[in-house]
Amino acid sequence: MKEQLIQYIVRLGDDSMILGHRLSELCGHGPALEIDMALTNISLDLFGQTRNYFTYAAELEGKGRTEDDFAYKRDIREFGNVLLTEQPNDDFAYVIARQFFFDSYHLPFLERLKNSKDERLAAIAAKSFKEVSYHLRFSTEWMKRLGGGTDESHSRLQTAVTDLWDYVGEMWQETDLDKELNQAGFAPDLKEVAKEAKAHIQDVLAEANIQAPDSTWSHSGGKKGIHSEHMGFILSDFQWMQRTYPNMEW
Amino acid sequence: MTTEKIYDLLLEVPDPEIPALSVLDLGIVRDVEIQGAEKVLVTITPTYTGCPAMDMIAVNIKAVLQEHGFETEIKTVLSPAWTTDWITESGKQKLKENGIVPPVAKSFDKKALMDEYDNVPCPFCESDNTALISQFGTTACKALYKCNDCKEPFDYFKCH
């Protein structure tokens, strides 16, 4: 079970890190100073969570690896983040829609992870939960603002929601690892998480006057290390330093 | 040597982001344990998981205690999670004196957080006629507000 637990914890860290990285790309490029600060603050929270997960995974593993090893010295197939998190910052509507979908899942997920049998994981969840509630509040409000704003903002948000829709379901698709750890009392039941997340998404889309696509099909693979084309570009940027100057320190 | 003596020394350790506050005011010191004649274990907890000041705080605590001849080990714990309720009364007063509004409500109620905003008074003119500019201000723990009466922008330490 320890092996599986480590794998699971690293996967949670990957979700936070890759989404955090996407947001960090916006540093200095936000549409307004306040938004720039908000998005980079959210990124900072996500990186804080990532550090907690990776540090814990490294301790459990006990092979002398550090949080940085998990971040910089793994290749693409070893990353278990969901595909949604690696989707690019096409425009502000994409950034908000991606964030909103992820936050809608993330908050009810963490709320349940607080009850994990693993005390350290429960503590990380309790800490992160408070931060993520602010993330969800931020992205929810921007969904409503863009949806109910101008024709331009509405049509851009509609396009983003339609394009990202097929990546949403993967968050609550259960892999064998999810099921196994849920049965052992370590991980949340993703069916319950999905129920709460879907209800919130539906309410907000209705209020934002945005049509949810009919499709219930979803991309998958991220949790098992099979990623979209974007992921390679993220890693080549993110891991550039360690790949170019192996084991460098500063 | 007593733990009181160590706590007195910790009063001299400022928070790197809000230097008017000591680490004790902020409520991030969980425990002080004397482990030998000149050896101390200080347990701290982060305010936010991504708070970049945590490493700095650990270094500063060590530096101040070392100056007084104590060898210090820092332990970081996550649970129970820090909340803004841990900020002391004197800490809240110091925040206010520095133009940062302390948290107006008790920590964390999910419903309150999701459904309504805190009514935050202006630290300069006391007016209640204020508006939120951004939920994320100069640091992750603060939101940015403005006063509609005196027109001053100000930071608000979010309930957390």
Image (cartoon, coloured by chain):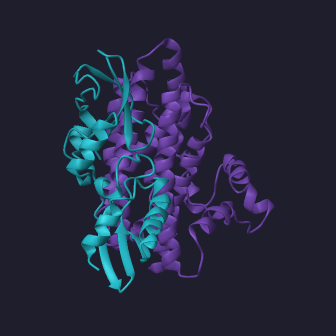
Displayed quadrant of residue B136:
top left
The residue depicted at 24 percent of the width and 28 percent of the height is B121
Q: Is residue B85 above or below residue B2?
A: above
Displayed quadrant of residue A142:
top left
Q: Residue B77: percent from the left, percent from the top?
A: 36, 68
Query: Which residue in the rendered view is the most extreme toward the bottom?
Result: B36
Q: Residue A243: percent from the left, percent from the top?
A: 77, 61
Quadrant for the N terminus of chain A, please.
bottom left
Q: Is residue A226 above or below residue B136?
A: below
Displayed quadrant of residue B29:
bottom left
Q: Residue A172: percent from the left, percent from the top?
A: 43, 53
Q: Residue A248: percent from the left, percent from the top?
A: 74, 66
Q: Is residue B153 something one can see in this rendering?
A: yes
Q: Is residue A217 something one can see in this rendering?
A: no
The residue depicted at 50 percent of the width and 25 percent of the height is A157
The chain displayed cyan equals: B
Left or right, residue B160 beside residue A23: left
The chain displayed purple equals: A
The residue depicted at 77 percent of the width and 67 percent of the height is A246
Q: How many marks?
A: 0
Which of the two residues, B16 or B156, is positioned nearer the viewer here?
B16
Q: Is residue A221 above or below residue A218?
A: below
The residue depicted at 47 percent of the width and 36 percent of the height is A38
Which of the two residues, A211 or B111, is positioned nearer the viewer here?
B111
Quadrant for the C terminus of chain A, please.
bottom right
